[in-house]
Structure formats: structure tokens, C-alpha cells
């Protein structure tokens, strides 16, 4: 099983993903760790990434997702802000990806981002992410007003109730 915890910066993707990996028995990866140095440099200077900046990063992640799927699966924390990015990520695996979308109020996101130390993503960048975000209707949508522990419990419960939780419906031929 491949599960991607997605959302804008500050929503708690990494924290939730790290806590979700043990109950699912899967390794955890953070997509931020796969950004090339040029992307990190741009973001650390408050310059939003373009689709061209993300293209190689997303291709690398898609390849890795395929490798991780072949070894049993993984949990990935990844912003996956646009549907086209999610399509690229899905292209690397043969099974549907389980999407968990962490969403919440801008004020809480800013508060969390402001409290982080040593992260290249500055709070000033949040508005560009929110403007880029295309909310997926098919994802398991959870509110970041819950604690990380509660979010993990909600994801585990969703999986127990529905093996296909948070997956994109298949496109039916016309």
C-alpha cells in the first residue's frame, strides 16, 4: 500500500506520516528530502517553485513510489498541491494511491510555520501554496485542528472501514 499525506506547508504531513508508519508497518519518507538543492535555495529565499521546478522532483518521487510499492509500500509526506502533480505521482505505481489531505485554517498554518526552526519554507510562502492548492475531492480529508494522534487514529479507522479509503475513483469509459 502506498499512502500520501498531502497538504500545504505547516499542515502536519511529516508528523502524521511518521506516526502513521508504525501502525501500517510501512516505512516513512518525506518528499522534502528529495528536492534538488536549486529548489531548496529558491524556497529558502521566499521564491515560490514553478511547475518546471517541480517536474524533476515529482518524477523522482514517482520512480521511488514504484520501488517502494514493489517492496510492500510506504507512507510519503508530500504537498501534492495540484491534480497534475498527483497524476505524476500515481504514474509511478500500479495500485491506487491512498490520499490523505490535511486541511485547516490559514491562521493555524501560519502559527505552525512560525514555530518551526531551521526549515527552508518560510511563512511568507504559505499564500502561494494556498493559491496553487487544488483540493482533491477523492482524498480522505481531515482537519488539522485535531491532534496528530487523533489524525492517525482517523486514518487507521478509515482503512479498517474501507480498504480503498482515499483513492481516486477509476475513470469509466464513455
Image (spheres, helix red, strand yellow):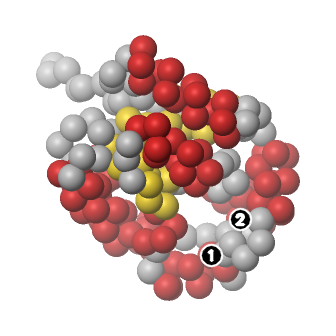
- Name the residue carrying label 1: 43
- Horizontal and vertical percent position of residue 90: 29, 46
Q: Horizontal placement of 101 versus 138: left or right?
A: right
* Quadrant of the snapshot with the N terminus: top left
Q: Residues within 10 Å of mark 1 (few under 14, many from 20)?
A: some
- Horizontal and vertical percent position of residue 74: 35, 49
117 in relation to 66, above or below:
below
* Quadrant of the snapshot with the C terminus: top left
The residue at the point 48 percent across, 71 percent down is: 33
- Say which mark, if any, is on residue 125: 2
The residue at the point 49 percent across, 85 percent down is: 37
The residue at the point 23 percent across, 26 percent down is: 171
Q: Horizontal placement of 72 versus 109: left or right?
A: left
First in sequence: mark 2 or mark 1? 1
Q: How crowded is mark 2: few (under 14 residues within 10 Å), some or many (20 or more)?
A: many
Q: Can residue 39 be seen by looking at this rendering?
A: yes
Helix, strand or loop for disc 1: helix
CA distance separating discs 2 and 1: 8 Å
Q: Can residue 131 be seen by looking at this rendering?
A: no
- Horizontal and vertical percent position of residue 39: 52, 78
Residues at badges 2 and 1 in contact (C-beta under 8 Å)? Answer: yes
Helix, strand or loop for disc 2: helix
- Horizontal and vertical percent position of residue 9: 65, 56
Of residues 16 and 142, the one nearer the viewer is: 16
Q: Horizontal placement of 141 versus 146: left or right?
A: left
Amino acid at each position: 500500500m502506498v499512502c500520501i499525506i498531502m497538504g500545504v506547508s505547516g499542515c502536519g504531513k511529516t508528523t502524521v506520516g511518521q506516526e502513521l508508519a508504525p501502525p501500517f508497518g510501512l516505512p516513512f519518507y518525506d518528499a522534502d528530502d528529495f528536492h534538488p538543492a536549486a529548489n531548496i535555495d529558491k524556497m529558502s529565499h521566499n521564491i515560490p517553485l514553478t511547475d518546471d521546478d517541480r517536474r524533476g522532483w515529482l518524477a523522482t518521487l514517482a520512480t521511488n513510489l514504484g520501488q517502494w510499492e514493489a517492496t510492500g509500500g510506504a507512507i510519503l509526506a508530500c504537498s501534492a498541491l495540484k491534480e497534475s502533480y498527483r497524476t505524476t505521482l500515481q504514474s509511478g505505481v500500479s495500485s491506487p494511491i491512498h490520499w490523505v489531505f490535511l486541511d485547516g485554517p490559514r491562521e493555524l498554518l501560519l502559527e505552525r510555520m512560525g514555530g518551526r526552526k531551521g526549515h527552508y519554507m518560510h511563512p511568507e510562502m504559505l499564500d502561494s501554496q494556498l493559491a496553487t492548492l487544488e483540493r482533491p475531492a477523492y482524498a480522505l480529508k481531515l482537519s488539522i485542528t485535531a491532534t496528530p494522534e487523533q489524525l492517525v487514529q482517523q486514518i487507521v479507522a478509515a482503512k479498517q472501514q474501507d480498504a480503498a479509503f482515499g483513492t481516486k475513483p477509476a475513470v469509466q469509459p464513455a
